[in-house]
Amino acid sequence: MNQPQKPIHFALTTPLYYVNDVPHIGSAYTTMAADAIARFHRLQGKNVLLITGTDEHGQKIQRTAQSQNIEPQQHCDKIAARFDDLWQKLNIQYDRFSRTTAPKHEKIVKEFFERVSNNEDIYLDRQQGWYCVSCEEFKDERELTSEKHCPIHTNKKAEWRDEENYFFRLSKYQDRLEHLYATRPDFIQPPSRRNEVLSFVKGGLQDFSISRINMDWGFPIPVNPEHTIYVWFDALLGYVTALLDPEDDPTLEKALKNAWPINLHLIGKDILRFHAVYWPAMLFSAGLEIPDRVFGHGFLTKNGRKMGKTTGNTIDPFDLVDRYGADAVRYYFLKEIEFGQDGDFNENRFVTVLNADLANDLGNLLNRTLGMAKKYCQAQVPDLTGEAIATDNPLKNQGIAITPKVIQAYEALNFTQACEHIFDLIRACNKYIDEQAPWSLYKQKQQDRVEQVLYAVLESVRLSAYLLAPIVPDLSQKVYQQLGFSADFNNPTCLNEQLQFEQHSAWGILPPKQVLQKAKPIFPQLELSEE
Ligand code: MSP
């Protein structure tokens, strides 16, 4: 553990999920996207730090534990383990799992609070207002329904609070925040979310309370232990605690030494205000740098309707993965729903998309091409290199053009577009085979042409699998394996040694005469198996 740490090139976070309940599809969605981005950067040889974790304090969690007659910590341990289970099932390669009940986190929160307090940004005042326990947030009365229900948690009534709280002087940072948004237009993405934040901030920022009384599930305020630190003030700092190496003393200095500022906070649109307004202001106050980018994705619905336990309109991510596999779930949500927009889950559509893209367009293509290679080329890659393929070969041209486009799409977190570019190439391969008809060429004894065609297709399939690996790593692995490679997309060492980006993201690297494996379906034809 005393070896020098490798510098981090890219650090990103998912939200730290509330442990009031087992993970839902919304948490899975953000985490799948984060994992795909992390894998894309790792594929490029970067040292990545993917941070996820759980947000374990606050009234919502305290009440859940009470209702089950167990200690809050015991409840948190149980649910945090369920998150980890889901991440294993979904093939999420996280580097840090930050839990806000960790003792080291308390030290970080205390030190941060003191910095902000020394900067005279904390004061005691009276807080009156409507509090939504499910959001853990005070709501403006205008936002509530006539029955005082929260717009997000429409089955829950907001609670009236009138108590003394410590406040954070957010209003002091109005100008600095506006300056931040103006000078770093990419700080909040996509643009629609940025506009939401700009108009909220333009309306004038008000100080917000950062302590609660009569609620002890959280850290005490250092100067007044009757008060408990507000769950959001505590939770955002979980991103900082996550940066500590296991052997580090829990200090801000140690935590921030190698991966600060965070490059990307990935969140859902409902928690944008906390990340794009409160969080940078807290960091300004503590004299710390601001993260590079906050991306707020959209909300998922099921069959066109809002999801919710009370209505029974839910998607259980565990069940979905059990029935269809991790790659299927990852592919559907990342390809089918434009990242940043709201999107719908419909099981018929799910099955149709997966069968069309993965089982048919890609799976059958590999299958039939390997079949022909076996018949016409002794189950080997034809004895050619990419350079030997004619410069006007359509697959070669498209293959060369696609990588920069896919890189650009991943960098913009546009998974849909990355997949579209890749599947354009895959569909072009199917068309090319049909047009070239290698079986006829073979009958006509045009072996050279047969080999040219098969090389171009096999190589295009390889490149497609490589570029899809951040989204469907197991599927890419199977394609690579059948093409005769032994490297593993799930193994970071292989990424750096046998699957190097510079080489594998280029068209034309499939080694001549590489022995091909037996064709096996890489993705099963799915049938609707509604619960
Ligand atoms: N604990 C806070 C985050 C603190 S971060 C320092 C929290 N947790 S949460 O578990 O309620 O929400 C986690 C994520 O799930 C959020 O990004 C939220 O947007 C996302 N989703 C919750 N429901 C969702 C959908 N129906 N659709 C997509 N994502 C949604 O907030």
Image: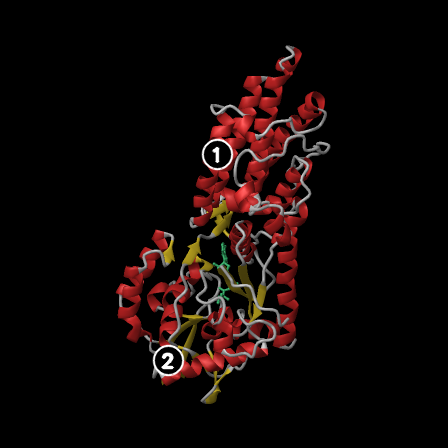
The mark tally for this picture is: 2
The residue under label 1 is: 400
Name the element at disc 2: strand
Q: How far across and how far down the image is residue 370, in percent?
A: 67, 28
Question: Where on the picture, by quarter, is residue 467?
Answer: top right
Q: Residue at x 46, y 89 (%)?
A: 224
Q: How far across and how far down the image is residue 270, in percent?
A: 43, 60
Q: Answer with mark 2 or mark 1, whichever residue precedes in sequence.
A: 2
Q: Nearer the viewer, residue 269 or 455?
A: 455
For the residues labelled 2 and 1, the Cα–Cα distance comes to 57 Å
Q: Determine whether, in the image, residue 285 is placed left or right of residue 413.
A: left
Name the element at disc 1: helix
- Measured along the vertical axis of the image, is residue 17 above or below residue 58? above
Question: Where on the picture, by quarter, is residue 385?
Answer: top right
Q: Nearer the viewer, residue 367 or 504?
A: 504
The residue under label 2 is: 167
Q: Is mark 1 within 8 Å of ligand 1?
A: no
Q: Determine whether, in the image, residue 239 is placed left or right of residue 196.
A: right
Residue farthest to the top, as pictured: 444
